[in-house]
Each structure stands twice: as C-alpha cells, then as structure tokens.
Amino acid sequence: MPTTPPPLRPGDRVAIVCTARKASHEELAAAVATLQSWGLAVELGESTNVAHHQFGGEDELRRRDFQHMLGRPDIRAILIARGGYGTTRIIDQLDFSGFADNPKWVAGFSDITALNCHLLRLGHESIHGVMPLLFHQPGGGAALESLRRALFGELITYEVPAHPLNRPGRAEGELVGGNLSLLQTLTGTASEVSTAGRILFLEDIEEYLYSIDRMLVHLERTGKLRDLAGLLVGHFTAPQDNAIPFGQTPEEIIDTYARKYRFPVAYGFPVGHEPSNLALICGRRARLTVSEAGTRLEYLEAEPAG
C-alpha cells in the first residue's frame, strides 16, 4: 500500500516550482496569498519567474530546483505552478532515493501526471489537483477547497450526478490515472504504473477524437483496462475533429472499450482541464459506488509514512 505524506499544519512551509511551463511571480501572487491565508509559509523556487522558451528555465534548472525542494526537510509540500509540457524531460534525472525518509506532498495535474505516476510506482501517494496558476479561475472554488482538504488530511467524499453512459457497480481500489496522453507516453518507462485492481481516472484537453480512440486502443492492447476495479471518466475539454468527422464524442469512444469489461464506470466526474477539477489522491484506496442515483467516491484507510 502506498505511504501517505504527513498532512499539512498551519505554519508549515510549502514550495512552488515549475517542472514544465514557465510562470511569473506576478501570475503566482494570488496563489501565494491563498496559501498564506491557509496558514502556510510559501517559497517560490528558482524555476519560477524565469523562462527558457516556453519552459520555466532550462531543463537542468528545473531539475535542480525540484530536487532541492525534495531534499529540504522544512518543505512539507511541493506545488507545481502549471502544466503544459516539460516534466518528462527531467524526471529520469531526479533522485527520489531519500523520499521515504522525508516524504512530502507533491501536487499538480496535466503534465504532472508523470510525477503522480512516478511517485506511485515508488510507493508514495501524491495529489492530482488544481495548480497555483489556476487557483482563482472562475468557478474553481470547489476544486481549490478540495486541494486544501487533501493537503491538510481532511475527510473527503465526492458525490456526482448520474450520467447516461454510467455502468452501475461497486469497487474498491487505489486511485491511479490522470492525463490520457501522458499515461500513454509513460508506457514502457520507469514511470509506468500498474492499473490492475485499481480505479483508473482519465482526462485530457484539445485532443483529436481519433487520437483519443488511438490511445484507448493502446490502453486496451497493453492490458491497462482488462483488470481494472473501476473507471472514472473526467473532462475531455475542447476535443478536436478532422474534416471527415470521427463520429463519436470522447465519452462514446471510451464507452466502446469500457463496455467490453465488467467494472463500474462513472462518466462526468469533475476532474481535468476545467474549473471543476476536484483533487484526487493518487495511490489512496477508495470505494467507488455507481448507481442510478449517481456516483459516490469515498477514501478508505491510508498508510502513514514512516
């Protein structure tokens, strides 16, 4: 069972770094103020407020900054400023050998799926949740509060309205998943994770419909769907199409493959590239209940670090 970093407490110090795209101090100012209002001390890493093309500094700077925050015992959580692209360029150069002795929360989504999966493969929980650059987007209050509750170790249960494509059932398993294109990219790497017996959650943004289908074919061919305990389908924001229409929505594409199996499936789960991006704890054991009344996701026991 993956271990759980200690919950944050008022007075703890947290860091904001860029492992992918750049973010300026001005863009992060509102998030810093919010974290301070939670009683936290905030440190902006050297990868913030710098730029190398679209990245938050060159690869070595971003790697060094994240590694530095990993190694500092006074930093109790690392929040990734934003996603985009770039985390997989540095992940193999990061040293997590001392993480078990000094565990801390790492939080982000989108491109940060790589870190979520890498930590889970190493046996540690992390948070798939809204990032500082998006803390104050309109309509994102519930997502931000869910991140706070996850970081501070508060009880979380989610209830979501029914969806016509839902398949009823009940399942228990550790949560795993994130951005569909990143999950495919991680196949065959040191960050690939097993999905067997776990509850998989998926989301993506601006992908072509045929690409979504291609990635689902890949998940099926590699056995990632075969032994799932359950499936949560999140936002597939702004899907693209070709001149000749693909003919299915993202949800209908996923249903094409999910219906081949018997696990419960919940569509319309609020996770992904939209303001309603509820925090999910990767590696945390949860109970998924899908019924005619809707979907309920509740966390079960956690394994404290140390």
Image (cartoon, helix red, strand yellow):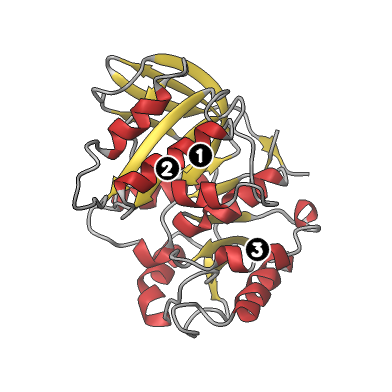
Instruction: Give the quadrant of residue 234.
Output: top left
Percent position (x, y) of residue 294?
30, 21
Disc 2 on helix, strand or loop?
helix
User: Tags 2 and 1 in contact by the CB under 8 Å rule?
Assistant: yes
Disc 3 on helix, strand or loop?
helix
Identified by mark 3, the residue type is Ile
Q: Is residue 297 left or right of residue 303?
A: left
Tell which circle, 2 or 3, labels the residue nearer the N-terminal end: 3
Q: From the viewer's perspective, is residue 165 above or below residue 192?
A: above
Q: Is residue 58 left or right of residue 288?
A: right
Q: From the viewer's perspective, is residue 159 above or below residue 186?
A: above
Count of numbered circles in the view: 3
Residue 13 can be seen, yes or no = no
Identified by mark 1, the residue type is His
Please name the residue that numbered disc 3 is placed on.
Answer: 91
Please name the residue that numbered disc 1 is placed on.
Answer: 218
Percent position (x, y) of residue 209?
30, 45
Neighbour class for label 1 at 10 Å: few (<14), some, many (≥20)?
A: some
Q: Residue at x 37, y 81 (%)?
A: 26
Neighbour class for label 2 at 10 Å: few (<14), some, many (≥20)?
A: few
